[in-house]
Image (spheres, rainbow, N blue to C red):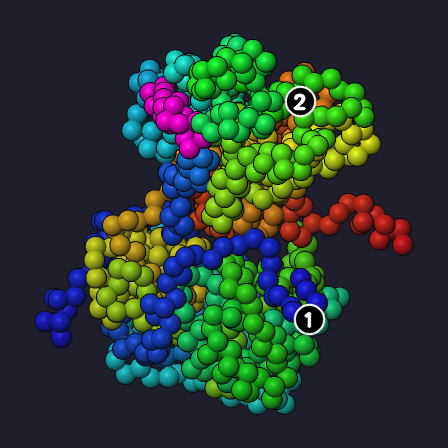
Amino acid sequence: MSFGKFKVFSFSGGIHPRFDGKNLAASEAVKPAPLLEKYVLYLSQNVGKMPKLIVKTGDEVKKGQLVAGADGFVSANLHAPTSGKIGAVKNIPGANGTLTPALEIIADGKDEWGELLPALDWRTADPKVLLERVRACGIVGMGGAAFPSHVKLSPPPEKKIDTLIINGAECEPYLCADHRLMLENPEKVLIGTAICGRILGVKNMLIGVESNKKDAIAKLNEKAAEYGIKVVKLRVRYPQGAEKQLIYALTGRKVPAGGLPMETGCVVQNAGSAAAIADAVCEGKPLIERITTVSGEAVAHPGNYLVRIGTPVAKLIEWAGGEKCKTGKIVLGGPMMGFALHSPEVALSKNSSGVLLFPLKGICQYTSAGCLRCGKCVKVCPMNLIPSILASAVESGKYDLAAQNHIADCMECGSCAYVCPAERPLVQHIRRGKAELRKNKGK
Amino acid sequence: MSETEKTISMPDANALLVSVSPHIHDKTGITEIMLKVMIALTPGLVAGIYYFGWRALWVTLSCMGGCVLAEALWCLLVKKPVWRTLKDCSALVTGMLLGMNLSAGVPLWICLIGSFIAIWIAKQFFGGLGHNPFNPALVARVALLLAFPGIMTTWVPTRFMNEENFSYTFEFFSPEDLEKGLAKKSFDGITCSTPLSIVSTMEKIPGKGHLAADRTSRQDNVQMWTCFIYGDKPGCLGETSGIALILGGLLLLYWRLINWRIPIFYIGTVVVLTGIIRYFAPGYTPSPMFHVFTGGLLLGAIFMATDMVTSPMTSMGCVVFGIGCGVITSCIRIFGNYPEGVSFAILLMNSLVPLIDRFCAKRPFGYVKARRKEEKKSC
């Protein structure tokens, strides 16, 4: 979208909350988290196939040692967050409440690094070597989807990729992990971007940042030119960081329905993943820690922590001073697309960008009231769908009607449910519709 | 360490709510929307009270009370929670709109009948708020108009229509009534006609003069237009004051409660169509501005056609809806026997809303127009 010389980098639809909660933790510097006695690693921390466990109970592991190897191409390696002994390996409830295999690591307190991969000079190393390094270090999309990064960075040769986009939009309310990362470690993000650019052989490298992170944009801009990277200010609008919307905002290209971003010649990586890639290449460190925001109205001291993967949510809450008032909901991830946890004992994964505590008083609860047909959901839908029709079709069991109305294109961003004056659980209905359609397809 | 741990209060896992995302909500609920609509309607109502006296307020209040009563009775009858249904204030809005669509001179039992028609027949029979295909207040108004044509077309003069403003007011009274009023020195209790009903009963001969069309004295003209715009003219109690209604409309636009396309395209279509007719056949219809400011067009276009439940959800649909309303209104006013066409136009278009929404849905993100795709292929 462009109006003469004023270019507006955005998309149509979307929302911006009256209170976006960013100010709770945005000014808090990242604090390193203390070493714990026990970590819980879920095996399934990526989209695609679950990695295969290669250690067993009682084994001694070093920090950064491979504990589960990628099973196939769309899968990611998993490494030990600290040195210690492997405890129980069993199925425990994961973030969404379903049983998922996980292993315990009992820390020995020494926190000793195992043998690290050799550091590479990213400017001279062969792109293939760099790509292999990204794969070996188990890097996934750290914004939420957890799609293995090496898969995105190896598009089929017939697809011409001309643009690399680093997603620093962080459009989810409350979260500021990427904001702090770009502010405190801009160089890492830039190097990671440049590495991705080299792997893809792409000259056009963009970092999209929402304009409410002015300090981070300024920091990135100080060095961006050195690396041949352009930092682009985006309109503050959720879901600006959704892959398709981000590509559209920055390049004006539309990802075809049901298609992948590479079909528009773009590859999108998260800013956190870019920093992890820089670590992997320059220091040989696998992905075992990330920055996570602890925030929400119910938490005593909102802040940002550099935590190891496998840290239980309860520990994070404890570091943040516990709850300020009675908690009604703990959310892992952002408030718009994250999971409501059934227990604070759930552990962080590679894609857990935030832990949010919402007070019990005034908690948001969607009720199944009748649709008003006000059309607000239609106005905000970034995919130009009609959520109210989708939801009522699912409610009355007309899944075919929902499919005709492109239910499959919904990305469940939650904008529709957020604005619905009747507080209808639109996303819930749409998810159920999708699940039913999948079930019917399987038959 | 153990001491500090004790002071930290941790979330109780048993009290956690687990639900599907999103976990926050824009706290604008139905109640807030309805209250805002009522606030936006208030200027129009105040103008009605100012011009027609306290009687206007009683009519509106009886309609609002009647609607709440009807809704409460219905809930008791079908064993729905009464308070939860009343809490959304939609019955109050329906009542307010219905009241503003009546003449200030109607007997109060008419209000009660209208309220029951609106809430029971037009709304609850279809399944309550959100399921009614037609605007309840308009259904009630049209039903009353057809059932009690005499009462519903009995208009009362405003408080300021007296012998002092003779030159302007005389047009609204029949010769006998005018004489009666002049003798009594008061027009209280004397019925009159609305500007549009005078126009519709006049002979439509192209080239021949019209009430608003060819007034000789410029001074008269200015006085008439001031009265029309401020609302000093007979008509429904809520529709008289154009500026008060526009003010309410601006409030609704500011709060983003209505889609601007509906009123703009509705009024625009009426202005264009009547303007064309007037240009080619002056005398056949009064000027476009006369159409905008005299009848129920502003009230209808700003508050009734934009009703969330019964208007299209898509922006393109709103354009189609507005133009459709405008075409039907103009046709009824120019060619029909009814002086007013707004209620019928909106109700007719209401019935087309599902169809409009279906054909005006935006192309989902990432889909290309089928035809363009083919063109590209053939190239």
Which residue lies at the image location 74% right of the left edge and 35% below the top edge? Answer: B275
Query: What mark, if any, has residue A5 been given in the picture?
Result: 1
Q: Is residue B330 above or below residue A81?
A: above
Query: What mark, if any, has residue A414 been given in the picture?
Result: none
Q: Is residue A402 left or right of residue A212?
A: right
Q: Chain of mark 1?
A: A
Q: Indicate the amino acid at tag 1.
A: Lys
Q: Residue placed farthest to the left in the image?
A: B3
Q: Position of residue A189 (x, y in %)?
A: 51, 79
Q: Is residue A55 visible?
A: no
Give the quadrant of residue A7: bottom right
Q: Is residue A216 visible?
A: yes
In the foreground, A311 or B358 = B358
Q: Quadrant of the C terminus of chain B?
A: bottom right
Q: Which residue is mark 2?
A: B199
Q: Which residues are magenta?
A: B48-71
Q: Position of residue A302 (x, y in %)?
A: 30, 68
Q: CA distance from mark 1 to mark 2?
A: 52 Å
Which residue lies at the image location 56% right of the left edge and 47% below the top edge? Answer: A379
